[in-house]
Amino acid sequence: MRLIFRQLHPNFINVRTAYASEIWAQLTKNLLVKSSAERLREYIKKQQEEKSMAGILTALLSGALMSIQGVFNTEMTKQTSLWVSTGWGQFSAFLVCVLAWIFTGRDSIGALWQVENKYTLLGGIIGAFITITVIQSMGSLGPAKAAMLIVISQLAVAYVIELFGLFGVEKVDFQWRKLIGMAVAIVGIVIFKWEK
């Protein structure tokens, strides 16, 4: 090693500088690649967190809107009839969807007939029954009790759908914590409904 540095070659300094420059370039390249990979991982993680937060906020908004809609529809039913208020709810929702479709790109409606699982086209019919059952449950139980029972039912059915992988949903393994969470929610309903 000592011989390399003591050589009296006329280009020794240039050769040494070239090797040093090459080593430095390789080190900085490795650091930049590592830094880029770390930045990419951080970006992906941030995107996932933002997506998760958006999902949480959307779910909370959805729950709030469902409760308000249930109260509105129940009050409308008192002044009209079950089928008139349900029909108006579905018709006004249809109008909003048509307007949104017009202003956001006008995707092909024909794609509906190309849906693989035709039973998924029944979502609108189920929506009408959701409106009817929410109106009736809120009318007889009140908004808070009805909403809690609706949420418990949604949790239970959604978990069964995931457990068995129904309707094309990815199948998940049984987890005790989810069952315990469901039990805690049911106990919460009993406590909330319990009157002295």
Image (cartoon, rainbow, N blue to C red):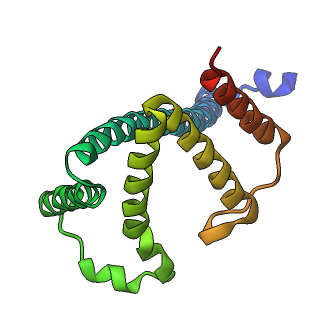
Residue 35, above or below 106: above
Q: Is residue 65 left or right of residue 158?
A: left
**Viewer-proximal residue, 42 or 180?**
180
Farthest-out residue, top? 196
User: Is residue 125 in view from this perspective?
Assistant: yes
At which x and y percent is residue 70? 36, 41
Q: Percent position (x, y) of residue 22?
A: 61, 36
Residue at image coords 50%, 38% = 146
Q: Nearer the viewer, residue 55 or 183?
A: 183
Residue ID at (44%, 53%) = 133
- The quadrant of the rendering that contains the C terminus is top right
Quadrant in which the N terminus appears: top right
Q: Quadrant of residue 165?
A: bottom right
Horizontal arrangement in the rendering, residue 171 relative to residue 42 (left or right): right
Residue nearer the viewer, 50 or 145: 145
Residue 118 image position (x, y, % from top left): 47, 82
The relative height of residue 193 versus residue 127 in the rendered view (above or below) is: above
> How many circles with numbers are drawn on the protein?
0
Q: Position of residue 119 (x, y in %)?
A: 49, 78
Residue 43 visible in the current orientation: no
